[in-house]
Amino acid sequence: MSGNVSGVSGISADQRMAIFPSARSNRFAGTLISAVIAAVLFAVVIAVAKPAEVWRLFQNTDRGLLAMAAVTSMAFLAARGLRLFLLVDRGLLTWHRASLVAAAAQAAALFVPARTGELALPLLLSRTTGRSFTAGIGTLFAARTLDLATLGVWSGAAVLAVRGFREPLAIVVSLALVLPSLLLPVTVATADRLAVRCFATRGIRGRRWARRVRRVRCELDGLLRRPYRLIGAVVTSIVMWGLQWTVVWILLVAMGHRWPPATVVAGSAAAAVANLLPFNLVGNLGTLEAGWTAAFTALGIPLHLAAATGVAAHLWGLIFAAFFGLAGWAALSGFSKKI
């Protein structure tokens, strides 16, 4: 009987009971290994930086410049909110509300373990706009695609600014960073078609996932039918990341290190790319510091100084994200009670 009932999916009920716990165990093991690797990376960076030096940089940060960095961080979140406002259907979300959602979602993405905090954005969009959770996933996917493309463009420009056009290797590296960003929309569309085909052949559960992928694709296609808003979102992404690099530069100056802006952009962009690795602790501790240290050392900054500034700057960034994120959650909760 059980074999006939589950014939659509190709496995029996008993087999599913055996497989799914195993899959959950594998996910848990993967998460645990990821956390251990990130913890080791963080421990190594701390050892190189020396805790006393990190604390000195953190404690002696110029308070006036720190306030300027906080204000610039607010501008970054406002730009992030503007991009979200442009990505969502017109009339569903104001710029102000979108900025609160952006601040709250960023904090959740940073502080909820195993990257599950990324789902805060579609959840908050569902609550504030009435759109489906799947539609919110489409918006999240579009935002992350823009982030990747923008990081590539900023990184490529920074490499050329640091090394110049006279070095053939710099030109090759810059093109390697920029071209995939320009081709990213084509890559995403191809990956989407492949995902639908793969899921559709995997029984009932597969077909459900295929329908979800199609809904996400419909959201992305909807953006293409609004070219002015999409172009606005692209421009806003470039400005948004420029503000993020400005925050980093101000923090470094506040700690007594006035490095060239192009060097700061190149090193910070490398750290942001390192964050994409599937090894992370709460707050992205470990991978970001390791990427920062490796990048700035390659750019000529002494190893111990690169490590110490990476940890101290990241700690200030986490404080900003926590403060603005809590403010965003509180404000959105207030809006919900009024409604």
Image (cartoon, helix red, strand yellow):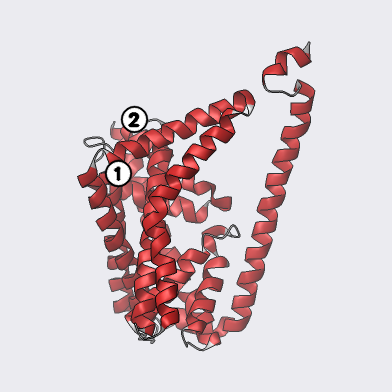
What's the amino acid at mark 1? Leu
Picture disc at residue 87: 1
Looking at numbered disc 2 in the image, what kind of residue is underneath it? Gly
Residue positioned most to the front: 168
The quarter of the displayed image where residue 155 is located: bottom left
Element at label 1 = helix
* Whether residue 197 is situated above or below residue 50 in the rendered picture: above
User: Is 108 situated left or right of 203 in this image?
Assistant: left
Q: At 31% across and 34% down in the image, what residue appears?
A: 129
Secondary structure found at label 2:
loop
- Residue 125's label in the rendered image is none
Residue 272 visible from this viewpoint: yes
Foreground label between 1 and 2 = 1
Sort mark 2 into few (<14), some (14-19) or many (20+) by Cα contacts within 10 Å: few
Q: Nearer the viewer, residue 28 or 174?
A: 174
The image's mark for residue 130 is 2
